Amino acid sequence: MKVSDNLIRLSKSCIGEAEKNAVLKVLDEEYLGMGLQVQEFENALSNFFGKPAICVVNGTAALQLAVQACGIKAGDEVLVPSLTYVSSFQAISATGATPVACDVNGFSLTMDLKDAESRMTRRTRAIMPVHYSGGVGDLQEVYEFAKKHSLRVIEDAAHAFGTSYNGSRVGHMGDICCFSFDGIKNITSGEGGCIVTDDETILQGVKDARLLGVEKDTEKRYTGQRSWEFNVSNQGWRYHMSNIMAAIGIEQLKRFDEFAFKRQKYAKLYDQLFEDSLRIKPLNNDYNLIVPHIYVVRIKDLKDRKVLQETLLNEWNIQTGIHYQPNHWLSLYNKPDLKGFPVTDEIFPQMLTLPLHPDLNTLDIEYIAQVLMKIISNDERL
Ligand SMILES: *Cc1c(COP(=O)(O)O)cnc(C)c1O
């Protein structure tokens, strides 16, 4: 698809000369697989988080390997909010374990722990909070809940790269935290993801599992060697990151402050522009701390979201999104005996994601907000 010049895109990668040159350099070196650049990106990320980071091929793989490294398997259950991208669910079911869909809190759109508690069984092993839009809700409470019930915590922080909580970056505190570097996330490495933890067993498990379970292969590759004779004692996957990807990631991480500043600035501006709107309600996010991946509003009494999206796109050149269709609606995860999801089911049809990425400018944000407010109040169908 050729993107039209005046289309305001919902999201996009922001790639400059530095990223392009870094990729060309790797191509010139003709060592494209996992080597020096991946190690360098991991070191830079470990510095950023103040805790070891292991890179993998995407955020879903990060989540799957984190769940697997906890020893979670068929017959085990993991609590996860229904309102998330299907990758959180697929990452859990890929290990053989069962994702147990939970309702969300209507203010932060993060997991409702009361609801989660009511869905626990003897087989519940872990909780996967999803940091919706970049906000973490009451993460402290998640950790207290996990402690009380002896659960592992695997944070799906795909939206929350760079968000601060309790005086440090998400990922610095806590058990295991997974990030995504797909093309439209807060920073990208093309595709990619990482696992952040200081649990030595999890770190070694993830390092081996990303390279087909070949024990200590990471250590070999980082010293320019190969494993010709080796042992494998666990199921692994081909989930490592390539030098091409890491080269992009290294440059993007250097630009993080610039990206974060713009995302926060535009989210604050949207909030301000919608302040007096009777129907358009932003999330309760503090954008001095949160680095938002998406900007979501709830539109009260919205009759037809599809018409709204089509109008915005076809008449005003504004692309919008929906994050996310609940996972308990999907055949794979819907069980007839599932307890209801009153909050998720009520708010989902009213949710709309507006354009947010660093290549927008303040005039774009003002235009989007004004168009949305105008058509919401004038179009009878909405
Ligand atoms: C992007 C995303 C992921 C997974 O990341 P990929 O890199 O696309 O595999 C997981 N969870 C959420 C909520 C995401 O938005």
Image (cartoon, rainbow, N blue to C red):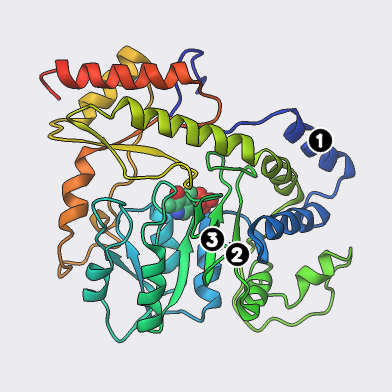
> Is label 2 within 8 A of ligand 1 (CB to nearest ligand atom)?
no
- Mark 1: few/some/many CA within 10 Å (<14, 14-19, 20+): some
> Is the CB–ligand 1 distance for label 3 below 8 Å?
yes
Q: Residue furthest bottom?
A: 122
The residue positioned 77% from the left and 38% from the top of the image is 23
Question: What kind of residue is marked 3?
Answer: Cys
Name the residue tied to disc 3.
178
Give the image location of residue 382, x and y in percent. Answer: 15, 25
Q: Residue at x 37, y 45 (%)?
A: 285
Report the disc number at residue 42: none
Q: Nearer the viewer, residue 143 or 336?
A: 143
Q: Residue at x 54, y 32 (%)?
A: 262
Q: Is residue 75 visible?
A: no
Q: Amino acid at mark 1?
A: Leu
Q: Is residue 260 above or below residue 277?
A: below
Judge depth for marks 1 and 2 and give the one in front: 2
Q: Is residue 122 left or right of residue 1?
A: left
SS of the residue at dot 1?
helix
Check disc 2 and report the residue beneath it.
196
